[in-house]
Amino acid sequence: MQLEKPLHIHRRHADASELAGIPWLQLLTLQERDKAVAELRVGDVAPGDFVCRLGRPVTYWFGVVEGLLKMSSDNDQGMTMTYTGVPPGGWFGEGTVLKREPYRYNIQALRKSVVAGLPVDTFDWLLDHSIGFNRFVMNQLNERLGQFIAAREIDRLNNPDVRVARSLAALCNPVLYPGVGDILRITQQELAYLVGLSRQRVNEALSALQAQGSLRVEYGGLRVLDLPGLRSTVVGSKK
DNA sequence: TCATTAAATTGTT
DNA sequence: AACAATTTAATGA
């Protein structure tokens, strides 16, 4: 499977550009923000590195500043199933942090990435003190619920083009992943890995989606032109 | 800053 | 899975 890599990546403080990539900071008051920034840590992770592992105690609430992570889980047979990718702007694990449960999944870097972490105690403090923070977390939980329902549907789809379209739409969710914008930085190989198809098939699907005008294929990424169109893509064409 | 080279990504079979 | 073509990143003058 995968190599065991060091788990704790929190190293330095975030610089200005990294702070700008953390969506919930702007919802805080100055005092709250100061405290959060003081406790925030960022670190670089290499492809294959684990950000958190299933079963380990919760230490941080994590977010992606740059790069791409993969959320996966191992079933009892040791098979790894991938739930979703986590692009820039995505924060995850509120549920486990809230309940102080062990992580229920693995988070692994798909490529070289910058990850930010907020210590659980600071998370709790913000939850107790900040209206803006509460609103963000609530929004996040609600939106993620929708994502999981959509993910189950995607799993049942047998048409590769549609699977790719829906998965892409999920990765471009502006609420969960505000750091993405209209260009999603992801290679066809990475997308293939997330969706569970061959790179060739993904390439073919992307060409079809480009022909239908939903996106444009670019080097190292995709420009999303019609997000609703991606979501409603059906076999053959748009709904 | 520019030119050259290496590495990464894509399109195709 | 392999290959060539294309794009980006890295290097050094």
Image (cartoon, coloured by chain):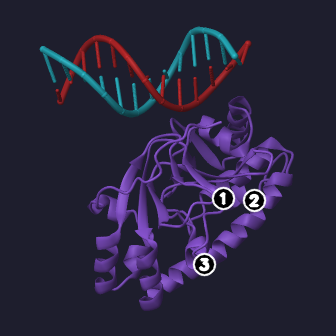
Chain colours: A purple, B red, C cyan
- The label shown at residue A99 is 3
Q: Which residue is mark 2?
A: A151
Tell me whether the residue at label 1 lies in contact with that at label 3, contact meaning CB atoms closer than 8 angstroms. Answer: no
Q: Chain of mark 1?
A: A
Give the secondary structure at mark 1. Answer: helix
Distance of label 1 from label 3 (alpha carbons)? 26 Å
The numbered mark, 3 or 2, whose residue comes first in the sequence reads 3
Question: What's the amino acid at mark 2?
Answer: Ala
Placement of A208 over or under A179, stated as above or below? above
Placement of A149 over or under C6, stated as above or below? below
Image quarter in which the C terminus of chain A is found: bottom right
Instruction: Tell me residue A118's x, y (percent).
Output: 42, 69
The numbered mark, 1 or 3, whose residue comes first in the sequence reads 3
Of circles 2 and 1, which is in front? 2
Numbered marks: total:
3
| Residue A226 visible (yes or no) | no
Question: What's the amino acid at mark 3?
Answer: Lys
Q: Residue at x 70, y 72 (%)?
A: A145
Of circles 1 and 3, which is in front? 3
**Of A138 and C9, which appears nearest the observer?**
A138
Placement of A24 over or under A14, stated as above or below? below
Q: Which residue is mark 1?
A: A170
